[in-house]
Image (tube, rainbow, N blue to C red):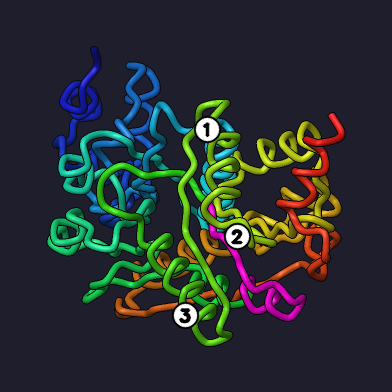
Amino acid sequence: MVTIRDVAEAAGVSASTVSYAFSGNKRLPAETVARVRESALRLGYRPDPTARALSLGKTNIIGLLASVAPHQPEADADIFMRFVRSAMFAAKERGYDLLVMGRDEDQTVTDPIVDALLVMDVLMHDHRLPMIRSIGKPAVIVGMPEDTAGLSAVDLDFEGSARLAVDHLVELGHRDISVVGSPRAGAELSWMTRFSTGAANAGARAGVNVSFQSVGAEPDDFDRWLDELLEERPDTTAIILHNVPLLDALLRCSRERGFSIPDDLSVVTLAPIERMVPLYPDLTVLDLPGRKMLERAVDRAVAELAGELPGVIELIPPTLLAKRSSGPVRLRGLVNALRQSRDSS
């Protein structure tokens, strides 16, 4: 294997001169640079880009610290990959590559190969943040933990989003609303905490009942949950789904059990509008603007690499696209619709 010392010997210069000739960090006579490059070409030497980047202290790589669990539903993984793709395109437009990192988190954040970090899947009390603060590189949180000291954060205003969805349903006359998602093991994600807080506050302000339920990922879990809902909260007339895979299960139950959306049950789903509109044109969608969130996070990281101070907090205002899946409360109601369907079968 040809080394930098071989090139230096062939060109009659020092190894450091060869390094300067390729990096451009020191002005050298044109004939010296030409002699070094000619020797390198003749010997088949190519500089190691990683070693060069590390020696310069700059790699032009932004790291994305995130994870996808093996058991995560395919629809969730699809949304996650849309986030990754948005970050990749945004980084590329600004002259950076994106490195998605899913190794042991403590090892990953101390890895020197990236210039800056984007941090996803943020918990309210995230154990990664003290170490991220200690590495001395720009780091932008895509989320809103309880403690953001010394770090910038970009996220959707999830509290505002939940309030917007509840207010929309209240205006349509709904008085009993269920917020439904999938269970998450361990500490709760920050966005889920803030979404739940926003929904609860909006319900209390409007004087309506807002309940929170979790539904598992197995095929029968949604049917079982729906039976429990009808038993325990028979007055429910609207649900807010913040887990996209549950939507298909709900639509299947609607077909199989004979209840109508929105006549018997109004539905609002938290999801990227750009993804949902082509697939479900009648669905009322509370936008999850992943592309905008990641673009803003990349912009913030690049700005801090250019010398701007950290500590900037940006919450993206919520957007609700009201369609036919949410409508006024009907006298029939979900329980009566299911009873009628059962009696007629």
The residue under label 3 is 201
Q: Residue at x 79, y 48 (%)?
A: 337
Please tell me whether mark 1 or mark 2 is closer to you in this view: 1
Three-letter amino acid code at the position of disc 3 = Asn
For label 3, the SS is helix
Compared to residue 315, the image places residue 33 above or below, namely above
Cα separation, mark 3 vs mark 2, equals 20 Å
Q: Tags 1 and 2 in contact by the CB under 8 Å rule?
A: no
Task: Write down the quadrant of residue 307 in the picture.
Answer: bottom left
Of residues 237 and 315, the one drawn nearer to the viewer in this rendering: 237
Q: Tags 3 and 2 in contact by the CB under 8 Å rule?
A: no
Cα separation, mark 3 vs mark 1, equals 28 Å
Quadrant containing the N terminus in the rendered view: top left
Compared to residue 226, the image places residue 87 above or below, namely below
Cα separation, mark 1 vs mark 2, equals 25 Å
Q: Is residue 117 visible?
A: no
The residue under label 2 is 288
Closer to the chain start, of discs 3 and 1, is 3
Three-letter amino acid code at the position of disc 1 = Asp
Q: Residues within 10 Å of mark 1 (few under 14, many from 20)?
A: some
Residue 2 % position (x, y): 24, 16
Residue 83 % position (x, y): 54, 49
Compared to residue 67, the image places residue 149 above or below, namely below
Three-letter amino acid code at the position of disc 2 = Leu
Task: Write down the quadrant of residue 132 in the picture.
Answer: bottom left
Residue 237: mark in rendering: none
Magenta span? 165-180
Q: Residue at x 60, y 34 (%)?
A: 223
Please tell me whether mark 3 or mark 2 is closer to you in this view: 3
Of residues 62 and 109, the one drawn nearer to the viewer in this rendering: 109
